[in-house]
């Protein structure tokens, strides 16, 4: 949430009136409300992660996934007893191992006694979507956060409230947007395969920390792309979580890690950087080749970490992964990608470490 | 797993040879291996829950959902390093708030040191499906359990193994099939919205108890259907979990509960019956009408329970629900239907109670 957006006029364009569930609803353009989760405002359309400077530079799929909206959320306040949305997705994506609500739906939370509490999701039908998220509420003025899709993008987004209710700019800065946390990595970082947007671990972590967490996860990638390292320096992050190793081979790591790190360290030397090991996902327990891959990756990561330390890189930290998903083998949908159960465990596992590192960065 | 099926010939019809991931695979008809989770073998096709006697009697959607396969699982043993499947679904169902793997996919578990451990799912593409679930395993002879779809049915099912490997009847009776547990209820009981079949609470409970758990959940129903009460008496269950209240009004409850209970008590008087309250799902926290509905339902259930006790019904038990989903409000996908996180919590919550009641029934 940038200062510019915080002071945007309370006047919003009323674009539509409909009747749903017996209530007259007015729709307001979500563009007029603060958006969290972006590193740069210089994007192709408002609801995107990668800036235009990446357009020629990033690999095709990094750019495409950079138009997806994991980690992005719209903040607003209203006293409406009902909240509805209309949204148009970018690529009308679908995947068999992830609920469509997580892929291209929306997820509403409300601030209660200083904590974000889940209200309900908006279920997608296809490219163009519309629906009442919640109705029959008390009608108190509340702060809301609407999480955007994890594996699709948003072309347009409107928020519907009762005709006589008020929608306004948020009055509370939650999550705190100064010195955000950045999570960089893979499909799992991007949110695969949370049932709904609020359950990606980056979003859980943001609620736990009360801190903006920027999601720079790219399915099938997280290949230490130099332009992404450059992007990380656009704001003044407190912590960067490096959660990329499950997509990076030892040779790719050795080839790219030092330049990647130097881009970050040169511009934001005070940032705390946390490397997270490849989690021991269930597939690796039975598939011997996958098991070897996990061991080799983690060995390469440990070696690279030691060498970076030797070369004088400061503020580097390393988190072992063996207990991050619990011991019962039930945390994933396909032996690799986390379910809500896996994301809940993973977020709770890394939370105390990230919290400590934020304090360290802000000392 | 009935005795008849346990002694089925080890000879199985080899119906197909294909090459996948560089391995030659032979496919075996799953009909030749034991199936758990059914109350009756007199069904329209092998992979169905409701017997033909319900066909004219049950409401249209109870019958249709009765052809879905929640709780059903095929047991086999093999020393193959790879396991594949081909399956044809009945209605090629899809839902936006549930991963397709849970709706119409398959889920493989292996028995390790007496405990069922998750291996991997088979991801569906549509009506006809095929895929390698796991490869590059050690090639030890292991016991396997393949869970069937939660919100669709199976027309045909084949299990693929390496050409030179052996597939055979299970050598261990796990879960124990004598005196099964029955869970009767709603869409949640049926498994909505687990990410994969193994995470429906009835299947988690079965693994925890090492006991066959029959799933008699019917989305949008669980309206105390008398023919379902009759069906429950076909085997000699130890415990019946009555998890229906979220779909039943006070007037429906008062009208139907006594006849429903008398059908059960007349035929299987030793069964222990556990009533579970409407869980305080997140939607009820914000939607005042839903909140009232939950309170009214639970009040009606408590009253009905007390009256049944007064009328001399024995072996009735009542479980309060307030802590069954945890306190953080994060257990559902849509404020009502459980995610894997919700099912994990719910199963762990009811497990000690059901375990005690099994001991009670078997005294």
Image (cartoon, coloured by chain):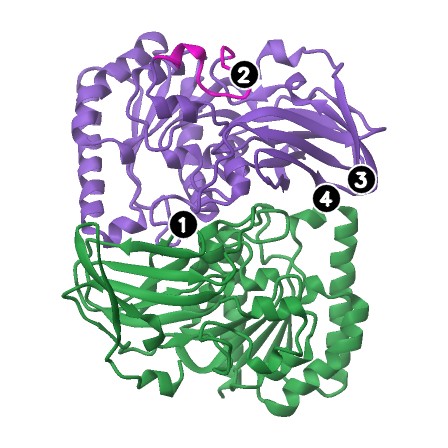
Chain colours: A purple, B green
Q: Name the residue under label 4.
A: B286
Determine contact: label 2, label 3, CB under 8 Å.
no
Q: Name the residue under label 1.
A: A333
Q: Where is residue B325? Give x, y as percent.
A: 58, 54
Q: Residue A33 occupies which quadrant of the picture?
A: top right
Q: Which of marks 3 and 1 is in front?
A: 1
User: What residue lies at 43% left-to-right and 64% top-to-bottom?
Assistant: B148
Circle 4 chain: B
| Residue A363 vertical placement versus A80 (above, below) | above
Left or right: residue A257 compared with residue A80: left
Determine contact: label 4, label 1, CB under 8 Å.
no
Circle 1 chain: A
Q: Can residue B217 be seen in this view?
A: no
**On residue A138, which mark appears?**
3
For the view shown, which residue lies furthest in the left direction? B164
Give the distance between the C-alpha atoms of the residues marked 3 and 1, in whole angstroms: 37 Å
Left or right: residue A306 compared with residue A183: left
Q: What stretch is highlighted in magenta?
A: A41-56
Q: Which of B165 and A147 is in front in this view?
A: B165
User: What residue lies at 21% left-to-right and 36% top-to-bottom?
Assistant: A297
Determine contact: label 2, label 1, CB under 8 Å.
no
**On residue A45, which mark appears?**
2
Binning the other alpha carbons within 10 Å of mark 4 as few (below 14), some (14 to 19) or many (20 upward) gives many
Q: Residue B218 occupies which quadrant of the picture?
A: bottom right
Element marked by disc 1: loop
Give the distance between the C-alpha atoms of the residues marked 2 and 3, in whole angstroms: 35 Å
Q: Residue B241 occupies which quadrant of the picture?
A: bottom right
Is A52 covered by the magenta stretch? Answer: yes
Q: Which of marks 2 and 3 is nearer the N terminus?
A: 2
């Amino acid at each position: 949430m940038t200062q510019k957006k915080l002071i945007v006029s309370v006047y919003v364009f009323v674009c539509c009136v409909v009747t749903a569930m017996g209530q007259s609803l007015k729709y307001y353009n979500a563009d007029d409300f603060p958006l969290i989760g972006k590193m740069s405002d210089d994007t192709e359309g408002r609801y995107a992660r990668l800036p235009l400077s990446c357009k020629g530079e990033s690999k095709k799929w990094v750019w495409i996934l950079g138009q997806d909206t994991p980690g992005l959320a719209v903040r607003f306040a209203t006293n409406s007893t009902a909240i509805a949305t209309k949204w148009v997705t970018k690529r009308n994506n679908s995947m068999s191992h992830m609920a469509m609500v997580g892929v291209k739906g929306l997820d509403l939370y409300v601030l209660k006694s200083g904590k974000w509490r889940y209200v309900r999701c908006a279920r997608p039908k296809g490219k163009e979507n519309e629906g009442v998220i919640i109705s029959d509420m008390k009608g108190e003025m509340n702060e809301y956060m609407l999480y955007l899709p994890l594996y699709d993008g948003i072309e347009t987004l409107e928020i519907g409230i009762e005709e006589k209710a008020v929608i306004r700019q948020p009055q509370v800065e939650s999550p705190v947007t100064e010195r955000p946390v950045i999570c960089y990595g893979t499909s799992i970082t991007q949110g695969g395969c949370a049932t709904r947007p609020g359950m990606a671990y980056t979003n859980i972590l943001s609620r736990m920390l009360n801190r903006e967490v920027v999601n720079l996860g790219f399915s099938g990638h997280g290949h230490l792309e130099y332009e992404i390292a450059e992007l990380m320096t656009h704001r003044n992050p407190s912590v960067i979580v490096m959660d990329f190793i499950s997509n990076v081979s030892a040779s790719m790591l050795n080839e790219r890690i030092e330049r990647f790190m130097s881009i970050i360290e040169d511009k934001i030397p005070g940032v705390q950087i946390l490397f997270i090991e490849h989690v021991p996902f269930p597939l690796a327990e039975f598939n011997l080749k996958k098991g070897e891959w996990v061991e080799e990756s983690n060995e390469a990561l440990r070696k690279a970490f030691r060498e970076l330390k030797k070369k004088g890189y400061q503020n580097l930290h390393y988190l072992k992964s063996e207990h991050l998903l619990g011991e019962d083998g039930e945390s994933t949908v396909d032996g690799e990608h986390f379910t809500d159960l896996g994301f809940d465990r993973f977020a709770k596992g890394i939370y105390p470490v990230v919290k400590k590192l934020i304090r360290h960065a802000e000392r």
